Amino acid sequence: MRSATLIVFVLLGFGLFAAEDDPEAQIDKIRKKVLTQGKVCADPARPCPDFKPNELSFAITGKKFDFDRGEDRSQPFYAVILRSDKLCSIQEAERLEVQAQFSSRKVFVHQHFCQDFGDKVTYTNVNRKVGFIAVYAGETEEEGRAFLAQVRAAAFKDATLRRMQSVVIYQIE
């Protein structure tokens, strides 16, 4: 029994176990917790609540945020990325112009933290340090590829298809 106690103290001394009452370890654990929620709201006329116009919103169908996790994510979907640029450089006027071309599909812009903590949405499977403008392409790869062909035919020759999720990042301090 004495040797087991000694091993635990040695492991604690080397930082291999976090103490239960270590607030930094508890906060870090919460930050890493992710909850996958509902589908994206791909109809631009009917966005899900609590999202900005430039964000691809999604249904929060599970537990509402209560400082118990670091992220909520949408169900996976496909998007056509029309172009990339420096983060925060794509303006709302351009998004609206493109939205007019694709009136039945949500056009969204990646602007994670461009307005301090006001832009809390980012996306998986992208470089979070790069801005982009994209159009929702569907839930399946087949839908996405068919839409990509339409987009390329409509003057966006360099457009690419990407599988991703919308992500709301909560600031846990």
Image (tube, rainbow, N blue to C red):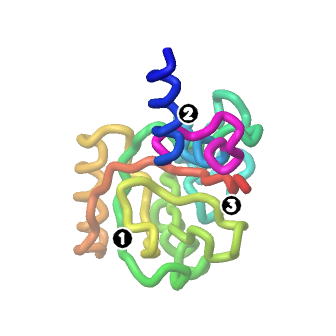
Q: Position of residue 21 (x, y in %)?
A: 71, 38
Secondary structure mostly seen in the magenta stretch: loop
- Element marked by disc 3: loop
Is 136 a magenta residue?
Answer: no
Q: Bin the neighbour count of mark 1 within 10 Å (Cα to Cα): few under 14, some 14-19, many 20 and up.
A: many
Q: Residue at x 46, y 42 (%)?
A: 16
81, above or below 78, in the image: below
Amino acid type at circle 3 is Lys
The answer to whether 116 appears left or right of 154 in the picture is right
Residue found at x 69% / y 29%? 63
- Residue at the far front: name it: 2
Q: Nearer the viewer, mark 1 or mark 2?
A: 2
Disc 2 crowd rating (10 Å Cα; few below 14, some 14-19, many 20+) is some
Q: Which mark is residue 52?
A: 3
| Disc assigned to residue 82 | 1
Contact (CB < 8 A) between labels 3 and 2? Answer: no
Indicate the secondary structure of the residue bearing disc 2. loop
Estimate the spatial distance between the alpha carbons at disc 3 and disc 2, rounded to whole Å.
Answer: 17 Å
Badge 2 is on which residue?
A: 38
Q: Position of residue 111 (x, y in %)?
A: 56, 71
Instruction: Name the side, left or right, on which 82 lies relative to 74.
Output: left
Apparent side of residue 22 relative to residue 6 in the rendered image (left or right)? right
Span of residues in magenta: 15-26
Please identify the residue farthest to the right as the structure is shown. 66
Q: CA distance from mark 1 to mark 3?
A: 20 Å
Q: Which mark is residue 2?
A: none
